[in-house]
Image: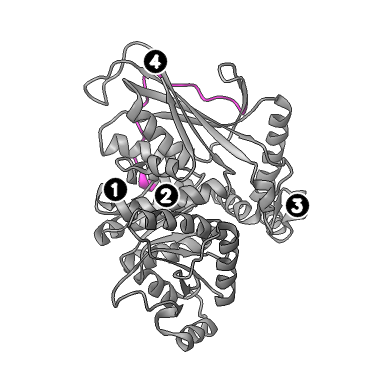
Amino acid sequence: MFRKSPKLLSHLRSNSSYGFIARMASLAPGQRYDLVIFGATGYTGQYVVEEVARVAQKEEARKVPLTWAIAGRSANKLQDVLATARKETGLDLKDVGLILADVSNKESLNEMAAKSSVVVNCVGPYQMYGEQVVSACIDNGASHVDISGEPQFLEGMQLKYNEAAETAGVHIVGACGYDSIPADMGLVHMIKNFKGELNSAQMFVTTKGGNSKTPIHTGTMESAALAIANSSEIARIRRQLFPKPLPKPKHKVAKKGLLHKNEALNLWGVTFPTDEPVVYRTQRYRHDVLGQRPLQFQQFLGFRSVIPSIGLIFGMAYFSIICYFSWTRKLLIKFPEIMTAGTFRRAGADREALKDLTFTSTIVGQGWSETLLAGSDQHSEAPDSSITVKISGPDPGYGATSLMMVACAMTILREKQLCTGRGGVMTPGIAFADTSLIDRIVDQGMTVSVKQ
């Protein structure tokens, strides 16, 4: 599974034992860092490092110090990450540990995981590089969070490692960023606050500010390309995970077309079901394990005008076509700026261009004001009550994603006894249903509101 990396292994051994290159004196033998950010030198990893730095400062003020380290392949680049983080946060960061680790070297991953309570994994695409880290975490007793939106990886890890993670007592929780905290945890929050019983929900995501021409980092593009290319594999995995379909609801909500107008919100909605696979797994758990009514869920990108909606549809169609064929997909990976007319760029977006960008996920739920005794019972009448949950934050791709990812890691660290079960491979909506994750993301700068 792992290709040999003699150069890295020699470097690890020559610098120090267990792949650590600095600041090990603060850890006693057998002690673990609370958090280790793996892939800290990547584009998103830089944001995550800065977010952990801010959280650590808050924890220090609360008299509950946080020990943490950053991990990657290059000692020099790790130092550069800390230098940038100092500049962006104004914090000293002198006690941050540095770890050398590489996805291509199993020993380095094991050593990293053995010194981690929670690994915050920023190395994608996860379909290519994620399993090695998950396996190392389970083998060495570390919990794991990632920001994958790749169904094949997420569901494949549940199929392959759920039992092992439960036995090891570690929580492996994927989709802990913009994919899919607003959707999955938004629905959890909605269910808790709804006075009655929910039947369905629709989510519309809108953005405000920023530059419409701001490029997206190619890591996101590669993950999406692999998901499209391997859609048949996803279907196979899902059949193994869930051999029996969910019962058909009596009050089934018709699927919206590719483009529709929501008059109540005054938005044009473009079908964009990136969170639906994660939400489905959470709803399966609610039905299969808890005996509760699963929610029907649909997801859209919202626009005030029909023109950008149509433009997005054509853009998605083009992207799907070039990802479907292997030769065009190779061209996309090799020449992303040319193949996407600058929509995706290896350097990512300019930080200044993202500072004014915000997003809002508006989730509208429909249900009944009265609750039936059993989740399998059917209401005879149509839904008569509604609720709206809004979740807002900074730019969804990096600012909000890093914020939510760190909040998930901190929830496992500080509230592990409240996380579902003793361990397993889970969605956020399963793992964090009974925790204060929503309060954490609000404390870190996001807003969550409920109106019924």
**Colour mapping used in the image:** one colour
Q: Which residues are magenta?
A: 240-260
Residue beneath disc 3: 339
- Residue depicted at 35% across the width and 30% down the height: 294
Residue 140 on image: x %, y %: 32, 69
- Provide the secondary structure element on which disc 3 rests: helix
In this rendering, the answer to whether 171 lies above or below 270 is: below
Q: Which tag, 2 or 1, sits closer to the chain's start?
A: 2
In this rendered view, identify the residue nearer to me: 122 or 255. 122
Q: The residue under label 1 is which amino acid type? A: Cys
Q: Which tag, 2 or 4, sits closer to the chain's start?
A: 4
Residue 190 on image: x %, y %: 39, 29
Residue 433 on image: x %, y %: 32, 40
Label 4 neighbour load within 10 Å: few <14, some 14-19, many 20+: some
Q: The residue under label 3 is which amino acid type? A: Met
Secondary structure predominantly adopted by residues drawn in magenta = loop
Q: Single out the residue that lies furthest toward the top.
A: 381
Q: Which tag, 4 or 3, sits closer to the chain's start?
A: 3
Q: Quarter holding the C terminus?
A: top left
Residue beneath disc 4: 385
Residue beneath disc 1: 419
User: Is residue 47 rendered to the left or right of residue 209?
Assistant: left
